[in-house]
Every structure is written in C-alpha cells, then in structure tokens.
Amino acid sequence: MMIDPEYPGTAVERMLAARSRVTSLTKDELNGDWDEVRRKILWAGGLKDLNSSRPGQGYTGHSFNDYNHVDLTCMLDKVSSNENDGSVKKIAIGNQLGPGILIASIPELGEGGSWSTCAIGCNQNPPQDVAHIQFRSRIAFKLVWCPTNTYDTFVLVDDDGKELARGTPSGRTIPSLPQRQMNYKIVSGSKYSLVADEVAGMSATETKTE
C-alpha cells in the first residue's frame, strides 16, 4: 500500500484511480444536463448517488450541489471516523462522517472511502480544510466554478491545483449563481483558483474580440 508521508490519511491508490476516472470523462459528459454531469463526477470520485438517504447515513444529494461540499477526498478506513476537534474553522465540532462514508463509497475504486468534504479553509497555505486537517488527506479533486460573467463553467483540479477536466453544464438544477460565486470566493487567491482564473481570462478576451 502506498503511503503519503505528508498526508498519511490519504488513500493514495483510490485517489489516483479517481483522478484517472475524471480524465476519462468526455466533453459531452461534462457539458450535458447538470444532474447527469454531477452523477458522473460522483462516479469518478467513487461515490454513489444517494438522494433518498438520510444526512449522515450516506446522503450525497448535497455533493457538488453547493459552494462548499466540492472536495472529493479519498481517505483510508482508519481515519474515516476522525472528528473535527475544532482545528477546522467554521465546521461543526465533531463532524462525524464515518458511517456515511462507508455507505456511500463505491468499493471497486480501491482501498478506503470517498466523501465530498467541505472546502472552507482551502485558500490558506497549507490548506486548513476538512480533508487536510480532519482526515490528514489530500484531495483527489476539487470542483471550482470559474469567475466568468455568468459563472457557467467549472473546472476539476487536483491537490496541486492542476486541471483534470472542465465542463459547461446546462439544466435547471445547476447550483444557483450566488452558490457558484461563493464557491469561487472561498478558493480565490489560492493554487486552486489558478485554472479558474485562466478560464475566466480567456472568456473575457473572447468576449472583447466578438
């Protein structure tokens, strides 16, 4: 088993498998109806689409559907029941996610489990978010909405902020504009916003030349 010495809670093989799945997604799959796009992102990260489960018991209806639950984290089983002791700011003390991780994780992706953890705190260096502090784990990928005029495009970036994929989905169930704007705000100025900033810059240039 591969061990990450800096973040030993990382399920490394599972994380790499998740990234491989992300890069296998096609433009059509990421530019379609948001509900289907989100299911593909969940699948890539090793999570089931469980909209009818109770929160805390495997419910993933919130995953990638708001500004905050956008970090796909692959953690080893031994840390999946770790709780927040207060080190992760703006997150509830305790924040017990273990049972939900066990229920919602797709086992064939590899050892450990997956969860869409909260991204708040990721704009600090080093990141002070749930993945890196509570689980001592890197993220497999993060969804960031790009600050174009309409915030209509997202990028999926890895723990170093490198792009894995991007999409411009459609449909009525896309997270609201304020949610998409807040999503960018919590990563702004960090390594995780660099690709989103580039996409927005290219969009602005294209608009000027039209």
Image (spheres, helix red, strand yellow):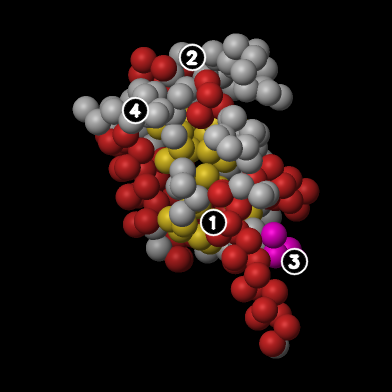
- Disc number at residue 82? 2
Residue depicted at x 32% and y 50%: 20
Q: Which of the two labelled residues, at mark 3 and mark 1, occupies the earlier sequence position?
A: 3
Q: Secondary structure at mark 4?
A: loop
Picture quadrant where residue 128 is located:
top right
Residue 120 drawn at (x, y percent): 65, 34
Decide which of tag 2 and tag 1 comes sooner along the chain: 2
Give the quarter of the figure containing the C terminus.
bottom right
Kindly identify which numbered label has been placed on residue 149: 3
Q: What is the span of residues highlighted in magenta in the rendered image?
A: 147-151
Q: CA distance from mark 2 to mark 3?
A: 39 Å
Q: CA distance from mark 4 to mark 3?
A: 41 Å
Residue 185 versus residue 138 in the image, above or below: below
Q: Which residue is mark 4?
A: 5
- Give the residue drawn at x 36%, y 43%: 18
Whether residues under marks 4 and 3 lie with C-beta atoms below 8 angstroms apart, the answer is no
Q: Amino acid at mark 1?
A: Val
Above or below for 166 versus 68: below
Residue 206 in view here? yes
Type of residue at label 3? Answer: Asn
Mark 4 or 3, closer to the camera: 4
Whether residue 92 is in magenta: the answer is no
Q: Nearer the viewer, mark 2 or mark 4?
A: 4
Q: Tell me if 19 is positioned left or right of 39 in this view.
A: left
Under mark 4, the amino acid is: Pro
Hey, which quadrant is residue 12 in on the image?
Answer: top left
Which element carries disc 3, helix, strand or loop?
A: loop
SS class of the residue under badge 1?
Answer: strand
